[in-house]
Amino acid sequence: MKRSLPLVGVLLLMTMPLVARTWKQASTGKVIEADLIKVEDGKAHLKLADGRTGLVEVLSLSLEDQAYLASVEKRETAATAATSTVAITTAGADAGWPAFRGPRGDGISPDRNLLTEWPEAGPKQLWVYDAAGMGYSGFSIVDGRLYTMGTRGDDVTLVAVDVATGKEIWASAVSKDDKEGYSSGWGNGPRSTPTYSDGRVYGIDPKGGVFCLEADSGELVWKKHLVEDFQGKMGGWGFSESPLIDGDKLVLAPGGEEAGMVALDKKTGDLIWAATELKPGKAEYATVVPAEINGIRQYIKLFEKELVGVNAEDGKVIWTSPWDGRTAVIPTPIVSGNEIYVSSGYGVGCKLVRIGSDNQPTDVWENKTMVNHHGGVIKVGEHLYGFSDAKGLICQDWETGELVWNEKGQFTLKGSVHVADGHIYALNENDGTLTLVEVNPTEYKQKGRFQLDPQSPNRHPKGKVWTHPLVLDGKLYLRDQEYLVCYDVSAK
């Protein structure tokens, strides 16, 4: 895969109405006149005054230019989504943040005009909700409602919270949590983030229960079980993937030796197909990712010993690539065009796989630059950002796999990441300190830091602050077990 070309690089002209504008590169201050052709995959396609065309990473431009491009990209998303080859939307046309890692599955917020530096005490706290329950479930937000899961007493509970006030709208107990067979000394409760689609919310409990609820009321519509219905096999820390909604399908990976992946009718829970060729053993923890490669819609999943692509139409395995995972593989794969990036902890490392025109996978590179346990990795432009065991927060080159920079400090040692408005929100798992870091492919630039407060006094002693941060509509959401905390990070 080639790097993004500089502004003078040549690119085939796209047939779209052109928009003239003066552009400024943030790092150099260079100003250039060019027509905007389109925005795609984090890059602005520009036509220069001499007729040549080129592309530039959006995040390398000034904040003013980025804000302008964000408005353009929002208008063009609907028109380009049907033909994009990148993994697109996990929840149909629903706006907001309907699923784990967002509508594009990339972990990047659509927000612009956020604070680029924080005051010493951190951004303003707006509200605290203290009844989310025990567990590490993340957030889905649609139409002013936040959905998450937790164990209240002995009940696995799905809750809806008003994002404006932090008040509970409804809470529905969906199953019992006996805390047996999966907590393994790290604490009990759901690990999966619920998914919203077409007025319904879908969740998975740690023992394999799958639930569909009405988003307005929390009323149960249907339920299934990954073990009882599909002979799935739970890993040592329970079922942790988040539900994938793709059109009318709900796609899950129960593991086991009968069918490693299944597609259900999202309206009824009825089985559409079972990937009977796929027999991975335990389910593992990474979420299924949708993609279109070589014109084939497919679902990509990382298991302990293989990365697989399964045909979205019938569940047939299209390709497999070996992976030497150990103990647990957790981070969600990243798909960009016909390339897939994966990483695992426990000393394993990372690799980039390219799917050829014959649907055969080839390893582009493999190394131990990124050894990501479970905090996730995010691709911005041609670089990757995430926590690597023993290296701290790092920036890695997508094309070569080489380390660009790393920051190994008290608060940037290990945790989870989220990206919004050209900045990384890096959450330290040990004490809940959140660091704001500029998305910068040349050096580490810290822009602020504060500590999540309050934190749970009920968290298991071995458990840490593992729920990934989220920024949406100018608000930052953090969670530690029963406490869900909202902050104002908008630039007013």
Image (cartoon, rainbow, N blue to C red):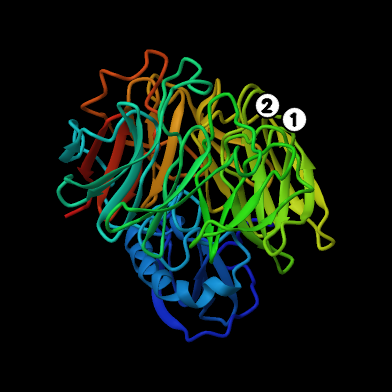
Residue 2's quadrant in the figure?
A: bottom right
- Residue 146 image point, x, y percent: 29, 49
x 38%, y 65%: residue: 70
| Relative depth, front residue between 374 and 33 | 374
Q: What residue is shown with label 2?
A: 348
Residue kind at label 2, given as amino acid type: Val
Residue 182 vertical position relative to residue 312 in the rendered view, above or below: above
Give above or below for 341 relative to 316: above
Query: Tags 1 and 2 in contact by the CB under 8 Å rule?
Result: yes
Residue identified by numbered label 1? 324
Q: Is residue 254 left or right of residue 93?
A: right
Answer few, some or many: residues within 10 Å of disc 1's Cα (few below 14, many 20 plus, some between 14 and 19): few
Q: In terms of secondary structure, where does tag 2 sit?
A: loop
* Separation (CA) of disc 1 from disc 2: 7 Å
Q: Please state if 129 lies on the left or on the right of 187 as rendered.
A: left
- Residue 158: quadrant of the picture: top left
On residue 419, the disc is none
User: Residue at 44% of width from left, 68% of height from top?
Assistant: 93
Report crowding for label 2: few under 14, some 14 to 19, many 20 or more residues within 10 A (C-alpha): many
Q: Is residue 115 visible?
A: no
Q: Amino acid at mark 1?
A: Asp
Horizontal and vertical percent position of residue 331: 56, 37
- Front-lying residue, 351 or 98: 98
Return the disc, 1 or 2, that comes first in the chain's sequence: 1
